[in-house]
Amino acid sequence: MSSKINRRDFLDRSGKASLGLAGGITLLSSAQSVRAAAPANEKIRLGLIGCGGRGMQLSEGFAERDDCTFAAIADVSEALLDNRAAAIAERQNGQAPATYGDFRKLLDDKSIDAVVIATPDHWHALATVWACQAGKDVYVEKPPTHDCWEGQKMIEAARKYDRVVQCGFQNRSAPYNIEAKKYIEAGKLGDIHYCRIYNQKPAWGNCPVVPDGTAPDGLNWDMWNGPAPEHAYNSSMHKCWHHQWCYSGGDMVNDASHQIDLARWLLGVKYPKTVYSTGGRFAEQSAAQTPDTQVALFDYDKLTVSFELTLFAPYILKTDPGVRDNDMFPYWMQNSTRIEIYGTKGMMVVGRHGGGWQVFVRPKSRQPVVKDQMYGRFPDPEHKENFLDCIRTRELPNSDIEEAHVSALMIHYANISYRLGGQKLAIDSGTEKIRDNAEAMGLFKRSYRTPWVLPEQV
């Protein structure tokens, strides 16, 4: 793993502030990424694949740097493509990227060094493999995969073609999370036997049941649908693709994958021994197929990890920019995306994407006692910097595809259990397969639609 981000001593750079409530409380305001100037002929040339909401955010973050430039962008929507090209040109002093309706033409451009993939989830694996085969390094949004098998192929492609493949699990590049991991590894929480991961939010979107229709002008629906089973255009499926099994895996995939990956990394665990998940769609009946209420349990050696999802709670809120851009902590009890790590010496509560962390010990006079803590910031800049650094050094990035794949497996196993009515699954850590369960293995790998096929041999 690249040490460019990790080896910085953020504590010394920012200065400690010991408040003495229970000894040694650490406060840290995360430094912004260092953006060293680079000669124009050394700029990394990027291609953007997928110009929707996350593609827009990523392109803005990369385009504001002076060590890279967008040479080309691709999207199946003409409107998105035109709007993003104009916005990127404005940020690049009038240098407009080439535009493509088919990203395979972008991959044919030998001058492009790396691609940023921000398509819907069901396209991530195939686009990544094709990019590796074309000699491009890859920044692929989370989740890296749509199913268990895809991650194995992505790893094979990255290693075979010697490509840097960074997944958009930004929390691994956050200075405050790096220090939280050091804190845990130093044994300051004691022995850890339980971890709770939360993803609790207000109702998400409106996915009414509507009849199939005609795709909007300028949208290549067949390519948007891609590897998924052939289906006529449906506006609700298109809008609510996060909640359709053929495109994604619900909010456990869409949002909770960030805190699941962060928790696994902090805990230092890999494959669970068993996985169980149950729940349902209870609060809102709609075209969405995935649950709005879900619980999952992951068993490790002397450690149980639980996951809880609710999508109907307007009183539980995500960490807002006012918190994550300042020296503040969320109100943890009603924070949507918190992680609680229980050790024999204390409990650590961690926020993803900023929000920092705090360690609680035994209350005194019925009041909470915080032993240690650290503020946090949104780590998008650090994660992009790590990716670009690794393109130059050829080191593994902070969220290398192999690590991202293992985190995604946790989610896929849980969703398989849920879809099979709450079957308890036993995991073979050597093969990543599900033991003695042909029905579950039937969901291990999807069927692909020609010509959008991820091959056995990459």
Image (spheres, rainbow, N blue to C red):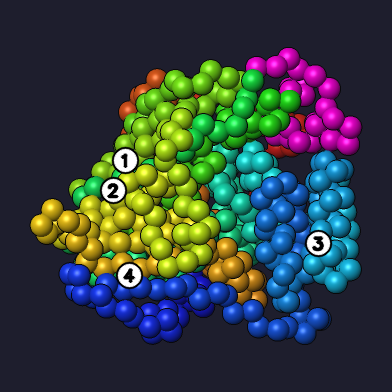
- Cα separation, mark 3 vs mark 1, equals 42 Å
Q: Amino acid at mark 2?
A: Cys
- Left or right placement of residue 267 versus residue 81 in this view: left
* Numbered disc in front, either 3 or 1: 3
Numbered label attached to residue 195: 2
Q: Is residue 436 magenta?
A: no
Q: Percent position (x, y) of residue 186?
A: 25, 70
Task: Kindly state the secondary structure of the residue where label 1 is placed.
Answer: strand
Give the mark nearest the N terminus, 3 or 4: 3
Numbered label attached to residue 205: none
Counting other residues with Cα less than 10 Å from the Cα at mark 2, is it few (<14), some (14-19), or many (20 or more)? many
Q: Is 443 rendered above or below residue 112?
A: above
Q: Percent position (x, y) of residue 293?
A: 42, 28
Task: Kindly state the secondary structure of the residue where label 4 is placed.
Answer: helix
- Cα separation, mark 2 vs mark 3, equals 42 Å
Q: Is 22 rendered above or below residue 437?
A: below
Magenta part of the protein: which range? 209-234
- Cα separation, mark 1 vs mark 4, equals 23 Å
Residue assigned mark 1: 306
Give the mark nearest the N terminus, 3 or 1: 3
Give the mark nearest the N terminus, 1 or 4: 4
Counting other residues with Cα less than 10 Å from the Cα at mark 1, is it few (<14), some (14-19), or many (20 or more)? some
Q: Amino acid at mark 1?
A: Ser
- Cα separation, mark 2 vs mark 1, equals 6 Å
Counting other residues with Cα less than 10 Å from the Cα at mark 4, is it few (<14), some (14-19), or many (20 or more)? few
Numbered label attached to residue 88: 3
Quarter location, residue 111: bottom right
Numbered label attached to residue 182: 4
Q: Amino acid at mark 4?
A: Lys
Instruction: Return the residue found at the far top.
Output: 211
